[in-house]
Amino acid sequence: MGSLQRARDRARRRRRSRSGTFSLSVEFGGKRGRTRRIHDRRAAAAAGSALERTWRRQATEEPHRIVRGNRRTAPEGVSTGPDTDAGTWGPGVSRDAMWSQVRTAWAMLAGSDREAPPDRERETAPPPRADERQVAKEGFSKEALPWLDAVYRFSLRLTGGDRDAAEDLVQETFLRAHRSWHTFQRGSNAKSWLFTICRNTFLHDRERPRSRMERSEADLGIHGDLMSSPPTTEGKLSDPEREFFGGLIDDEVVGAIDGLPDEFREVLVLSDLGDLRYEEIAEVLGVPVGTVKSRLFRARRRLQEQLREFAIRSGYVQEGR
Amino acid sequence: MMKEWMGMMRCEAALARLWEYLDGELPSADETAVRKHLQVCTRCYPKYDFQRAYFAYMRRIREKETVPVEQRQRLFRRILEQESSRPGG
């Protein structure tokens, strides 16, 4: 056997010994390198079921998706820079925080998905019978009253930060809602319904503030204490107590919101303070979702221009970026 | 050109969807594309971070603005009065 034949035999033995493993060799180049890759693929195919199971498990346990509503559940686990840590998942969000968001968001989605669409025929629903009245009252406590603070926040911004006017508007909203509770279909979106009543009440009262006061007192038997200070529903008040948050930053933000035109302010407040989704806002305002988005984004851009100065001073962004 | 590498969403497209992304209103595919873009884009990330700070601030406002206790009690009292004054109530 010549030396050339012996060298070929050694090479053949080496190739056989490599099959079934992933070890690589660089002692052969060119054509032998291509042969090595073929052997590796065959080895992976033969022994790759375990590896494949690992990949499948990783893909299952770490789905590449993010959950809706992230801005509303994002505060925990948020870092201050781009994601460079293998233990984080998404821009600056830790994996635990992301799973927390997953659970929270799914719970919210599951709840909202189960809700029936608002009852478009509730205006013609018959009044409740006497034996249903107690049920209606219980439902009002459970479905409407939890939104008291949310409606109050909306009222505050509608009235330009006038607390007295906002409290008056909230009270009028809930008294009206209570009177009309029999027209509300159970299981539909009580929050949107209340916001709609609040907005309609505000718009109606802004046009006829005096007649509203007279009507409220006559219809509801309201005591004079609430009405002792006539609500101011036009323009902003220079009330020092309207400083809700304290500090220069809060003043700037609140002032910027109150200074927005009505159509921008209400959509921004419904979204960013009322936490309503686009479809819910569209329902409250009676406009298409596309209009909601257009107004909301324009409103935010206007706010952005003023918040930008705050951001520069606070170091969020650098001037000129 | 850099932003189109390996099918990565462009900065302009990502920023155009930033509000909807933060609002949780994007379709799943777009949401994933924006998220992946933000993970690697150092130009867009500060803008995203600033908007997120804005929403965090609005959350704090929401938590602070609540109906005063006296007003709340007054409302409940009047609801009950209204209920009792109803015919058949």
Image: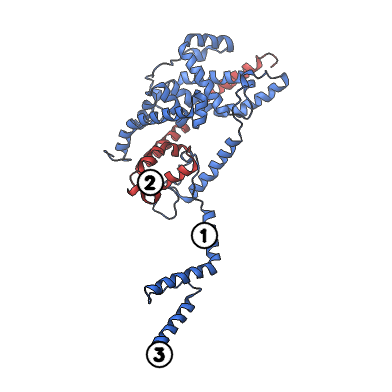
Chain colours: A blue, B red
Quadrant location of the N terminus of chain A in the rendered image: bottom left
Which image quadrant: the C terminus of chain A?
Answer: top left
Name the one closer to the observer, A149 or B14.
B14
Residue drawn where x is 36% and y is 40% of the image: B12
Which chain's residue wears label 3?
A
A262 over A1 or under it: above or below: above
The label number, if any, that marks residue A55 in the structure image: 1
- The answer for how far apart the CA atoms under marks 1 and 2 are is 31 Å
Asked if marks 1 and 2 fall on the same chain, the answer is: yes
- Residue depicted at 44% across the width and 37% down the height: B20
Q: CA gap, disc 2 to disc 3? A: 70 Å
- The label shown at residue A2 is 3
Callouts 3 and 1 close, C-beta under 8 Å: no
Q: Nearer the viewer, mark 3 or mark 1?
A: 3
The residue positioned farthest toward the right in the image shown: A131
What amino acid is at disc 1? Trp
| Residue tagged 2 | A80
Q: At label 3, which amino acid type do we have?
A: Gly
Q: Is residue A222 above or below residue A174?
A: above
- The chain that hosts pointer 1 is A
Sequence-first disc among 3 and 1: 3
- Tag 2, which chain? A
Closer to the N terminus: mark 2 or mark 3? 3
Residue A249 in view in this figure: yes
Q: Residues within 10 Å of mark 2 (few under 14, many from 20)?
A: few
